[in-house]
Image: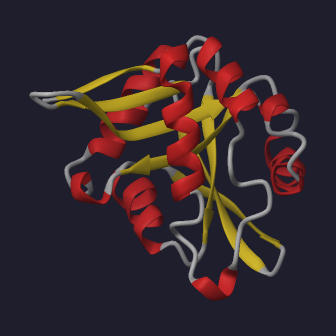
């Protein structure tokens, strides 16, 4: 049975391990590593403490196993990454100062054996409802060549593409989920 819950401090080491293992899953070997894409333990700890990480946990007979996670958080937590700074400047041109009213959405990861079951949607709906009073929208950056993520977030889950940007020789869709409607 899959249970969705906010991450706890006791989940931190497993989240760090999973993030290191899967941070570049969407990239081909030619694309290398994304700059700033892997969350470190300190950032994961702060996001856990502030209620910004949701876990999908399969309660197996002998043990519980994390099979997915969704991270979001205030823009200030991601401001040290050049790509997120660039995204924020692009978004400000369209929406004005959105740093306080929106949150950065991502990364999101679902174990390959659990994909295609609507788990991504369940996670953002659950976390989005918990954050609804704090933010009006969640903003995600999706690589233009990441068809699985585009399908999951835009076509299946109702995020809207609000802009496009280039960074480090790769294109990104900037997508938004309105928490007032989501």
Query: Up-down: is 51 above or below 108?
Result: above
Name, please, the residue furthest toward the bottom: 30
Query: Up-down: is 155 above or below 85?
Result: below
Q: Is residue 68 left or right of residue 101?
A: left
Residue 52: name its quadrant.
top right
Question: What's the residue at 45%, 25% (across, down)?
Answer: 127
Task: Tell me if I can see residue 98 in this picture.
Answer: no
**Residue 146, horizontal then vertical, whole percent:** 52, 72
- Locate the N terminus and report the quarter of the image it occupies: top left
Task: Tell me if I can see residue 97 in this picture.
Answer: yes
Residue 2: name its quadrant.
top left
Number of callouts? 0
- Locate the C terminus and report the quarter of the image it occupies: top left
User: Which colour style is shown?
Assistant: secondary structure
Q: Is residue 7 left or right of residue 111?
A: right
Q: Which of 135/60 is in front?
A: 60
Q: Is residue 105 left or right of residue 109?
A: right
Question: What's the residue at 90%, 50% (across, down)?
Answer: 89
**Residue 130, horizontal then vertical, whole percent:** 47, 15
**Residue 78, horizontal then vertical, whole percent:** 80, 39
Q: Which of 154/20 is in front?
A: 20
Name, please, the residue furthest toward the left: 61
Question: What's the residue at 53%, 40% (across, down)?
Answer: 177
Q: Which of 45/102 is in front?
A: 45
Q: Is residue 58 left or right of residue 98?
A: left
Question: What's the residue at 45%, 49% (across, down)?
Answer: 109
**Residue 36, horizontal then vertical, whole percent:** 78, 54
């Amino acid at each position: 049975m899959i249970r969705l819950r906010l991450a706890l401090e006791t989940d931190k080491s497993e989240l760090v391990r999973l993030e290191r293992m899967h941070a570049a899953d969407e990239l081909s070997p030619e694309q290398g590593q994304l700059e700033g894409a892997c969350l470190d333990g300190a950032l994961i700890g702060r996001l856990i403490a502030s209620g910004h990480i949701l876990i999908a946990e399969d309660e197996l007979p002998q043990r519980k196993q994390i099979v997915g996670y969704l991270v979001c958080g205030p823009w200030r937590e991601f401001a040290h990454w050049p790509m997120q700074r660039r995204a924020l400047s692009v978004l400000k041109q369209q929406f004005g100062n959105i740093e306080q009213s929106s949150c950065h959405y991502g990364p999101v990861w679902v174990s390959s054996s659990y994909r295609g079951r609507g788990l991504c949607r369940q996670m953002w709906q659950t976390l989005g409802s918990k954050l609804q009073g704090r933010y009006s929208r969640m903003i995600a950056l999706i690589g233009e060549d990441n068809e699985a993520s585009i399908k999951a977030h835009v076509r299946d889950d109702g995020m809207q593409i609000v802009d496009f940007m280039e960074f480090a020789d790769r294109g990104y869709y900037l997508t938004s989920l309105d928490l007032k409607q989501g």
